Every structure is written in C-alpha cells, then in structure tokens.
Image (cartoon, rainbow, N blue to C red):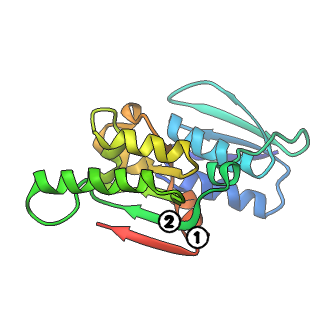
C-alpha cells in the first residue's frame, strides 16, 4: 500500500500527489489530509476515476483508504445528466462587472447571471475564483441565478483556496468547492472559455 501524507499541502497539491501515485501504478493508497476541502477534492477525483474510497477521522487528520476493485459509481456532472448545455465555460474572477462604480457593478453581475440562467442552452461550466466566490453565498442575490443554472445543467466549480482565503468555505450554498487541478481540467475540456475579471 502506498502512503501519502498531504497534510499542510495547499490546493491542488493533495490531488496532484494522489494522481502521481496512481500514474506510478499504485493500486492501494492511504492518504492523510488535514481539512475537509482536501478530503472532498481528493475523494471526488478518485471516485470520478472509479476508485473505492473510505474515510476515517475528522479535522485535523483525515485518513482516506483507496482501492481499485469494488468500483463506485463516478459522480456524473450536471452537463452529462441534462445534455442541454453548450460546450462553453465562463471563468468569473470578480464579484462585480465594470469599473469603479461598485453599486452598478453588482447590478450588472446580477443581471448577467440572471440572463444566463434564462438562456435555453446555458454554459456547460461556470468557475468562480478570487472574490467571485462570494457570489455563491446565500446573502448575495446572484446565488439564486447560480442555483438555477446548476439545476438546469451547468457545472459550477467554486475555488476552495479562494473560499478559505475569505473565510467563507462553510457559507457557500451553491456549487462544488473545487481545486485548481479540477478547475484547470474542466476549463481546458471546453471548446470555448469566456473570462470576466
């Protein structure tokens, strides 16, 4: 069994360490992480690859035991389930659209996401990074539009490093707390990406 100590490693290092072990041919792993976001990111990565994952412990030390064999069903992303989305991604890195007028910028972002939510073919992927992760909080009026987009097939990834930075990880109410590896793979997998911010 291959042992990986990913405690103290910043996103996306725990996922990358796990991927490297699998690429080297490991068939059984024991991975130690020190926070729930790393646990979630590593577990999702493994399950999407068909690995069986069991978890013991809680913060600050979580042990993941991983085996190939009794294959778990990989998580199916909304765009695969719904089949109505366009092969587009939108990377949002700001909570407001436009220049120095913050009030106008917030109104414009709400209108932009609300308009996206009404399209017959929404984008396949939306990524929230930097201060845009705040858009996924219940207190922001944009969370309703993001929730609607997710329900109609858009995959919504929220940067975990960013939510940790702002101290809001446990307040995110829509989307999947993600990591840079998953975000990069998802963006590069799309035919077209639009960046805001």
The location of residue 8, given as percent across then percent down, is: 48, 45
Camera-side residue of 54 and 48: 48
**What secondary structure is found at the residue carrying circle 1?**
loop
- Residue at image position (55%, 52%) is 155
Foreground of the two, 45 or 83: 83
In three-dimensional space, the C-alpha distance between marks 2 and 1, rounded to whole angstroms, equals 6 Å
Examine the rendering and report whether any part of residue 32 can be seen. yes
Residue sitting nearer the eye, 94 or 16: 94
Position of residue 123 measured from the top left corner of the image (x, y, whole percent): 51, 61
Residue 164 seen by the camera: no
For marks 2 and 1 on the same chain, the one whose residue lies earlier in the sequence: 2
Rendering quarter of residue 25: bottom right
Q: Is residue 36 above or below residue 7?
A: above
Disc 1 marks which residue?
A: 190
Disc 1 residue crowd, few under 14, some 14–19, many 20+, Cα 10 Å:
some
Q: Nearer the viewer, residue 86 or 20?
A: 86
Q: Which residue is labeled 2 in the image?
A: 89
Mark number displayed over residue 135: none
Return the residue found at the far left: 101
Mark 2–mark 1 CB contact (< 8 Å): yes
Most distant residue in the right direction: 69
What secondary structure is found at the residue carrying circle 2? strand
Tell me which residue sits at (17%, 57%) in the image.
105
Residue 51 lies left or right of residue 133; in this view the side is right
Residue 182 in percent (x, y) is at 57, 58
| Quadrant (top left/top right/bottom left/bottom right) for the C terminus | bottom left
Number of marks in the rendered image: 2
> In the rendered view of the protein, which quadrant contains the N terminus?
top right
**How many C-alpha atoms fall within 10 Å of the one at disc 2: few (<14), some, or many (≥20)?**
many
User: In the current view of this chain or complex, which residue is farthest to the bottom?
Assistant: 191
Q: Answer with left or right where residue 157 lies relative to residue 85.
A: left
């Amino acid at each position: 069994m291959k042992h990986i100590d990913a405690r103290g490693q910043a996103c996306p290092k725990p996922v990358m360490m796990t991927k490297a072990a699998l690429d080297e041919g490991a068939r059984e792993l024991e991975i130690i992480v020190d926070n729930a976001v790393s646990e979630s990111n590593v577990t999702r990565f493994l399950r999407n690859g068909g690995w069986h994952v069991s978890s013991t412990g809680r913060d600050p030390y979580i042990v993941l035991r991983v085996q190939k064999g009794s294959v778990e069903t990989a998580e199916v992303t909304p765009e695969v389930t719904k089949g109505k989305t366009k092969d587009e991604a939108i990377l949002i890195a700001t909570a407001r659209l436009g220049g120095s007028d913050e009030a106008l910028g917030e109104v414009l972002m709400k209108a932009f996401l609300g308009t996206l939510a009404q399209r017959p073919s929404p984008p396949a992927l939306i990524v929230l990074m930097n201060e845009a992760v705040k858009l996924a909080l219940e207190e922001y009026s944009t969370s309703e539009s993001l929730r609607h987009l997710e329900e109609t097939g858009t995959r919504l990834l929220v940067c975990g490093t960013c939510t940790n930075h702002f101290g809001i990880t446990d307040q995110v109410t829509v989307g999947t707390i993600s990591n840079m590896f998953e975000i990069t793979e998802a963006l590069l997998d799309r035919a077209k990406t639009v960046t805001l911010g």
